Amino acid sequence: MKKQVGIEALAIAVPRKYVDIAELAQARGVDPAKYTSGLGAKEMAVADPGEDSVALAASAAARLIQEQGVDTSRIGMLVVGTETGVDHAKPVASHVQGLLKLPRTMRSFDAQHACYGGTAGLMAASEWIASGAGAGRTALVICSDIARYGLNTAGEPTQGGGAVALLVSEQPDLLALDIGLNGASTQDVYDFWRPSGRREALVDGHYSIGCYLDALSGAYRGWRERALAHEVVRWGDTLPSEQLARILYHVPFCKMARKAHTQLRQCDLEASAATQNATPAEREELAKSTASYEAQVASSLTLNARIGNVYTASLYLALAGLMNAEAAALAGKRIGLLSYGSGCCSEFYSGVVGANAAQRIAKANVEGVLARRERISVAEYERIMNLASDAPEQLAPAPGEFRLKEIREHRRAYVAG
Ligand code: CAA
């Protein structure tokens, strides 16, 4: 039997504070419906300087190890996907190794390609295991980021922060990956970037949406070609994409998942014999199907709507949200996942939800993690945004979590709760 490889378990970590998105809209003199209905947001996580990408990554990984009973001596690879790392040379992964006392015998590195870095890490880890090079060992892949555009910018309501830690192994209780079917799309574009030394990202917002949709089309068509060849999906009464029980997207803001789903359906409708005689307007109407969006996408967005963009972790937050909502019902069913990183690279892949997914996600207690947060005012959010990144407030971390304590002579020190 072909070796199964994929995600065995996951855990999330989020900043302790959040703002209500309607309150932010009011403070900015914007109709709240633009942020809630136009962008699909409810709340936005606010990371203070003590909650940097290292602290969030280590907190998520510590929770994964503790709650899922991970045997750390079997971890042979640690990859952190991040675009908000803390050093040009020393990777976040090395901090996580030290803070969690992970094996010195493992390989470790950061993967960077904007929001695609986490997926790059997941694919490196799962293909390492599938090839046999892992020799039975597991991999820890952590996606950790703080999305920051700045006060009073168009991107402001799409900020956020957090981390998702994934245990990758030959026991894919959450999601067994269809290794070898992935489709990818890469193009040199300036849609979103953050020059060295800047805390805030630069973005050509509307252009970035177009880049995402173009890259999605290329990646999805690549996956579909291989999935058809392997008879994982077929042209028939339903579209190939409709044969996936759910489809998860990179979620810079929740409404983007809806735009992405429409684009994906367009790719199928343009290639389907059944709609060859339809006009472009008729195809567009079919692509926009609310029923399809509600059935295949909507249930995955609850966590993203309450946290905001988490760059590399956004897709995996959608996976956590989907599993939290529907793991038992989806056991044995195939889902699709679309990763997008500006710059840009996109990858579409699929996997089958495991029989033990419901037990695994229950242990992750994602609702409990969010329930421990504190709602803050817009004034307090603005105060936190104006704090210097190298002078964290001396707050005690919650039990099992980490915070940046200080930076001395350019060396970062962390404290555990
Ligand atoms: N009531 C209801 N809806 C309203 C409204 C109101 N009063 N006012 C506006 N809207 C709707 C608009 O119609 C629009 O919806 P559609 O796109 O469906 O038409 C939506 O609200 C947003 O309105 P605008 O387009 O006018 O908003 P904007 O120009 O101020 O900014 C944005 C939107 C470009 C997404 C901006 O938030 C931004 O730059 N965000 C960061 C970049 C980003 O997330 N890009 C996504 C692709 S790149 C990527 O995915 C990588 C990554 O993680 C960054």
Image (cartoon, grey):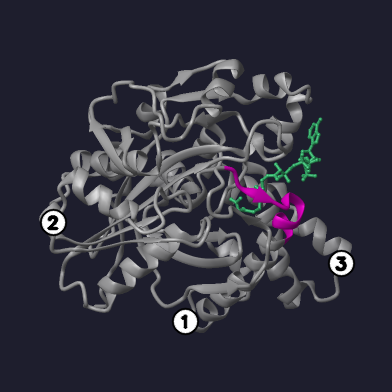
**Residue 319 versus residue 116: which sits nearer the camera?**
116
Q: Relative to 261, does residue 324 appear above or below in the rendering?
A: above
Q: Looking at the image, do the residues carrying marks 1 and 3 touch, with CB atoms under 8 Å apart?
A: no
Q: Which residue is mark 3?
A: 280
**Residue 251 versus residue 276: which sits nearer the camera?**
251
The answer, for residue 275, to whether it is visible in the render is yes
Could you tell me residue 139's position as x and y percent?
A: 25, 61
Q: Looking at the image, do the residues carrying marks 1 and 2 touch, with CB atoms under 8 Å apart?
A: no
Residue at disc 3, secondary structure: helix
> Which is more N-terminal, label 3 or label 1?
1
Residue at disc 2, secondary structure: loop
The answer, for residue 238, to whether it is visible in the render is no
Could you tell me residue 102's position as x and y percent?
A: 16, 52
> Label 3 CB, ligand 1: below 8 Å?
no
> Which is more N-terminal, label 2 or label 1?
2
**Residue 281 versus residue 217: which sits nearer the camera?**
217
**Farthest residue toward the front?**
409
Of tags 3 and 2, the one toward the viewer is 2
Q: Residue at x 59, y 71 (%)?
A: 219
Q: Is 377 displayed left or right of 364 in the figure?
A: right
Q: Is residue 208 rendered magenta in the image?
A: yes
Could you tell me residue 275's position as x and y percent?
A: 78, 71
Q: Is 232 displayed left or right of 263 in the figure?
A: left
Could you tell me residue 246's position as x and y percent?
A: 52, 54
Identity, as a three-letter code, of the amino acid under mark 1: His
Q: Residue at x 54, y 73 (%)?
A: 184
Q: Is 43 displayed left or right of 397 in the figure?
A: right
> Which is more N-terminal, label 2 or label 3?
2
Q: Which residue is mark 1?
A: 230
Q: Relative to 365, does residue 375 appear above or below in the rendering?
A: above
Q: What span is in magenta?
A: 200-210
